[in-house]
Amino acid sequence: MKNNKNKPLQIALFGMDDRAYKTMSMYLKGPCKGIAVVVNEFEAEIDIIDADHIKAKALLAERKNKGASRPILILSLEELSIEGTLYVKKPVSKEGLLTALNKAKEILKTERLKQEKKITEPEIKKEEVVVAEKKQAGIKHIDKEEKKKVSKHRTAMDLTEVGFSAYIGHVDGIDFSDRKQLLNASYNSKGFFLGYVQSALKVSKAKGRILQLNSGWKPLIIFPHSKEIWLDADDKQLRSFAGLAIKSNSSQGMTLTPVGQNSSNFNNKMEGFYDVDYFLWKLAIWTSKGRYPSTIDIKQPVFLKQWPNFTRLVVTPHAIQIAALLILAPRTALDIAKVLNIKPQYVFVFISAAHVLGLVGQAKRQADDIVLPSKEIKVAAKKGLLSRILGRLRG
Amino acid sequence: MNQYKIIFTGPVGAGKTTAIDSISDVPPVKTDAAASDMTKSRKAATTVAMDYGIMNLSDGEKIHLYGTPGQERFDFMWDILTVGGIGLVLLLDNTRADPFKDMRFFLDSFSEFISDTNVAIGVTQMDLSSKPTINDYHEHLQAMDLKPAVFSVDARVKNDVSLLVQALLFSLDPGLEGE
């Protein structure tokens, strides 16, 4: 029989990120004089769970299920009394942790004595290794599959005025410098791919089913639970299709069909997955091409419900500026362009994209006219300094 | 000479040091020290004094980037830090047990400074924990009658931090034009 008296306890940590994991490892080594060392879950004798972690309940259930007779230490800000666990109050003190670990040591000792009567030590080890190998094999498999998937959180594209025209393309026959034409520069999303995607999203969400939108072009698959879209098309292809007006009689070719999780369409093309908001935002930009949605009354003020999550979207020219102004109070699109001294197309594109995500609204109540802000905006005392910081950030 | 500062605050492990590192022109002065207790069991090294970085502007002016100590026992320093501050960047860790509690705590602690300037909020670690969502944060903020910018942020990504600071600047004055 091995002498375990001076051997450090082997513990596994759950519900801790890398930083907390390292902190605990150092804490055990330093202030706790090496009473325990952190090992992987398969080699551990004791489990420590951070009960303030978002998934603490699930972790505890899992450890109770998998760890069987292993002592479990619960670290929590609130006092807890959970059967079969040892509690350590946060902030964790050296004394509190050492007391709990010593109790766990006693439990282990009792359990070992019971086990030794039933089974020999080498057999236990062998069994643990087999289980561990099976589990590790499973983890590797998942990692391999996950690696194929390109992150759906694509970094924001920050567009300048120079690159923007080329990015969105242009609409023939509209002279934006002509006020009359400008006021009529609208589009109806229902006549474009955008409108069909929006309708399909609504149906998919209502039914809670994965659906495929068949447009006669490339199939688009909607995953309502993960809020993702799959489409096997690059930006150039999507931009071209987004700008094409779809005649109402040809829309009869648009169908929605249910899709199984194992569809061969997207299984090997992980790069085709997009976050729904990112996709819609981009699609709206390419549908707009500098025009505003016809559902918006150009002469009425619009309001912004909340800031768009710009770090995960395409940032069109002046979009942050427009959002900052519009979050203060409702304004008409043309008023925004005038106050910020920018081309109306930039405002129209922003309104189109924000509108498709439901971030922009237009109230028709009488009261909205009354609270309209003055034409001028408050100028910061340190305007020059702030402008230089901005210039530096935009490099 | 004026000392202009942008203050980065938030709980331990939210990415303040990394965010400053992302946009600083000089290697930031890190004052991280090995955690000697488990007051905050989130980080092997924690900021006990403050982090510091610099952004050099075109006219030779310097913007000082200060990260507040994450440990709440150092909150007496926050008042000193905010003197001359341009605005506040609040970083929140989405994997924490109750990030809304963190948000309320920091918004409350800096309420005076925020009312004089403005705040932009970056939510980190959303790749590890997608909930609460950005919309959830907005709902909480609207209940507090606040409408600041709230972005998902990877503090290691310069563009994410840059966009967050740009949102802060435009919140101070939407009419700004970069020089």
Image: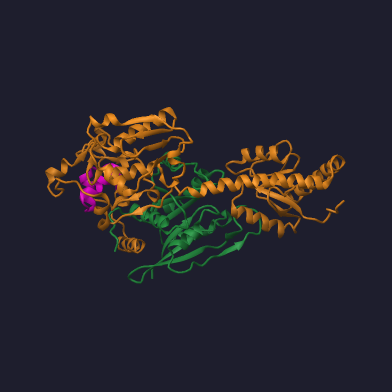
Chain colours: A orange, B green
Image quarter of the C terminus of chain A:
bottom left
* A144 displayed left or right of A173: right
Q: Which residues are magenta?
A: A324-352
Work out whether residue B38 or residue A342 is closer to the camera in this orientation and state it.
Answer: A342
Residue at the spot x=34%, y=38% of the render?
A358
Picture quarter containing residue B83?
A: bottom left
Work out whether residue B165 or residue A215 is closer to the camera in this orientation and state it.
Answer: A215
Q: Is residue B149 visible?
A: yes
Q: Position of residue B8 (x, y in %)?
A: 47, 57
Q: Position of residue A294 (x, y in %)?
A: 22, 36
* B68 displayed left or right of A50: left
Work out whether residue B125 or residue B58 is closer to the camera in this orientation and state it.
Answer: B125
* B98 displayed left or right of A293: right
Q: Position of residue A17 (x, y in %)?
A: 59, 51
Picture quarter containing residue A286?
A: top left
Magenta-drawn stretch contains A348: yes
Q: Main secondary structure of the magenta part?
A: helix
Residue at the spot x=36%, y=34% of the render?
A213
